[in-house]
Image (tube, rainbow, N blue to C red):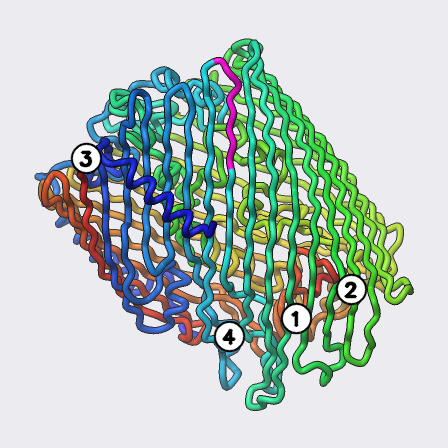
Amino acid sequence: MKPKLFGIVLALIGSLTGVGGEIRAADNSDATTGAIEVTPSVNGVFVDGDDNKFREDWWMQEGLNGGVENFTLRRELGEDTTIETQGRAIVPEENYRLDVLIDKRDVGYIRAGYSEYRKYFDDTGGFFLPFSESSFDLSKDLHLDIGKVFIEAGLLLPNMPKLIVGYEHRFKDGEKSLLEWGNVTEDVTRKIFPSYKDIDEKVDIVRLEISHDIANVHLGNESRYEYYRVDTKRHAQDIEIGDPTGTETVTVDEDYEHDAFYNTLHAETHLNDTTYLSLGYLFSTLDGDASFRMMTVPFGPEIRDKNWFTNSIDLDQDVHIVNANVILGPFRALSIYAGIQGESQEVDGNTDAILTESGLGSPEALIDSEKDKWGVEETVGIRYTGLPRTTLYAEGRWTQQDIDLTETEFEDGVLAFERDTDTRVRRQRYSIGLNSSPLPRTTVAARYRYGYRSNDYDHNVDSEPTGYSAFILDQDIKTDEVMVKVSFQPFPRIRTSLQYQLVVMDIDTDEDTDPPSSPRTTDYDADIYTASITATPYAGLFFTGLVSYQDVHLETVDLPDAPIKTYDGDVLSVSTAAGLALDSRTNLNMQYIYTLTENFQDFSDEGLPLGSENQRHAVLANLTRRITDNMSVKLRYGFYSYDDDASDGADNYTAHLVGASCRMTF
Amino acid sequence: MKNPGIFSKKVCGLALAGMILLLLFACHAMKQEPIHPVAVVPGAEYIGMESCALCHAATVKDFKFARHAKLTVTLPDGQEVLGCESCHGAGSLHMAAGGGKGKAIINPGENPATCYQCHPEVQAFFSLQYHHPTGEQGITCNDCHSPHGENIMLPKGTLMGQQSAPCDQCHQEQSKPFVFEHEALREGCTMCHSHHGSINDKLLVASDANLCLRCHAEVMGDQIELGGGSHNSRLAQGPCWSSGCHTAIHGSNINAHLRY
């Protein structure tokens, strides 16, 4: 059954079985009570400028949209049996949701649902201001419809094993933008031409969960079978400005499907008030098949134009994971927890392909790869709550992994590529912190995290000794993170918080070069400042405000004329909301969102600047009037603007939203 | 290039106008009925975790090990509320009604506003230009995080032990196995993606080749060496994942250099 049809059927079931119950709205802003709650709505969106950019930013398209913004229902079907439904349906946004839950106390439940939403994508690629045409768009309606349908039944009889059976179908369908931009040539070449991908992705999942308490031990087994398939087609284009004959199109068709089975067996017990034990074992196996077809049109003018296709691609993956955990305490306010997990993973891949390249023939490539991974991870943590109004905590986590990777490629029977790499991974992560209320109405949270990961590569065989892909000899990644947050209530109705976060990452890499070079260090640091306030100065007014400022610095190479510059960026974001009771029946709610991004550097002579320099504003106002006890009306207005200097205004827009909804209960 | 400036006239003017408006509203609001921001159940009183355990025994039992277990909320009268009701709001009306999903109780699983009260920095990420649709399309914090468990990430059940499990649920196309893997995925998705929100498309940590050069670059004289060859002229045209280059960035079934 088609997902949408299934959803409509569920909606009808919900409507037919639900009349006559009682509900109470969870949203307390204009709460009303009744049997059914329905909120029809209609909105008009008017955009001046780049409407594709607007809809990508704000998840709604220009024009009219409307439908049922919210539908809820709760009804007693009989003794101990209830039905609850909740849903929405907004067109043409393809925004649907319906959940139906029928619950009978001490017997079980059936839950079914359908949800779908649409994600929009701008069809503009990159920008290069020196070109006579600085940007291009595809004139395509790029969007993905994303959703799922599910049904689940649980048998929850007292003192009997708990049984849950479920089926779920997920989907993604449509076209999305890519960042794989194509060449645009006018004296120089810059890769800014937009590209996109068709996606048809589906996954069917069947689940079975059984659990039961025997003595003081909770035993459970969860099984999942998954049938996943995805068909994609990538489109990229190279053009020459002023020369239509210079256009070349590359499409890559890929299909993939797998069957996968996962099973987890776990047991846990509270031996006593201070000792908790758990054990788990996961086994999963995956069997996948894929195909690949790449076409270049026109084929041949350029050397190495590619028309590749595969006869077969096979992928297999097996995973075993075991873990054991213990939590001890609290003993005089001290709790200790520890865990150990072992993992084994095997991945095999085989490809049989014909690699036709202009000027180079059509060899048949037989590719094999095999990865074996073994790993152990240990965790130890403590938490101490013995100090007044204070929690102290610390955690250490260590990982040891050995990964053996072999890859071979034969072209027409001749070895073209071979790699055999053993990788030794060692990882350490530590965190220490506290949460405290040292003074009345004041709380302090502080945390320090340190992470260290060492990847040591031993390339036993490498047919491209200084080239891809086995060219990293050793890599260390160190991360330090500090966070301090102070929350303060100067008055009972005003709460404020200030937070500072520092993230520093150093990546040291030693590569296999000829002549040998010294190890290189990449520096990344980010300072993030956040301040917030929540105030309810009077019963009829609330205000929340949030200001966040990020200062990011990323330096990878430091060369004066290099095509890459150090990344320095400022980001400021402001988000505020206020609510005001105008009278006993009327509320006004307002929201303002602002972001400012500044990290554009113009180095067009040396490369392709990809930084941003833009401002976004959004103002939203809702006026809600309760007409009767069972009906309220909401009028809304929104203003949006986007001003992007990096795109020379090509992405700019201003937009207005006008809408109304009516919330009714019966 | 025009520099808008963080404290531009437009921003300052809007802020000033907003404050004046707020003051005017405040004078008016003193006379009106109460309205509530979030995590307040009108008319309800706090009943304590023990009362919650009467119906939610399993959740309460495990919750004492959770990082959220010591959460407290200070009420306007100075009273401190510990545990469940610090996020779900006062529970007396919910209990009196006999329970029920969302019945006289706040469900942060339906609305991230409750989580934002303690995690404002996350809200700031979600307000950036590119973000997961927590506000727009009903995706909530609970879809990736489990607030009741010991470890608030979700490597449990049939996804036990898998580092990128929260991402894999919706992004299988990127996490599925490949004949040639990109070893960066061993570090996890967040090595390259800012998962809550970003100023860069596809939630990238950086919008240009700096993203890749963190791990892949050697400087030989005035040249940026990658895999045994100078890449200066190629990097001048665009980032590493551009068309014709290393487009199969999550893994490839046909090319060891992740070209397609």
Sequence-first disc among 4 and 3: 3
Q: Position of residue A77 (x, y in %)?
A: 29, 27
Of marks 1 and 2, the one in the foreground = 2
Q: Are marks 1 and 3 in contact (CB under 8 Å)?
A: no
Q: Amino acid under label 1?
A: Leu
- What residue did someone put label 4 on? A127
Amino acid type, callout 4:
Phe
Tell me which corner region of the image, top left, top right, bottom left or bottom right, holds residue A456: top right
Mark 4 residue element: loop
Q: Secondary structure at mark 2?
A: strand
On-image quarter of the N terminus of chain B: bottom left
User: What is the CA distance from the residue labelled 1 to the residue labelled 4?
Assistant: 16 Å
Give left or right: position of A582 versus A469.
Answer: left
Disc 1 marks which residue? B235
By secondary structure, the bulk of the magenta-drawn segment is best described as: strand
Residue labelled with disc 3 = A34
User: Can residue A476 be found in the magenta stretch?
Assistant: no
Seen at 60% across and 59% down, the residue is A231
Q: Residues within 10 Å of mark 4 (few under 14, many from 20)?
A: many
Q: Which mark is residue A353?
A: 2
Q: Are labels 1 and 4 assigned to the same chain?
A: no
Percent coordinates x, y for residue B248 in the rendering? 66, 61
Seen in the image, is A646 located left or right of residue A504?
left
> As shown in the figure, which amino acid type bears the numbered disc 3?
Gly
Query: Which is more foreground, mark 4 or mark 3?
Result: 3
Contact (Cβ within 8 Å) of mark 2 with mark 4 = no
Is residue A177 placed above or below A267 in the rendered structure?
Answer: below
Q: Are marks 1 and 2 in contact (CB under 8 Å)?
A: no
Q: Identify whether B227 is placed above or below B74.
A: below
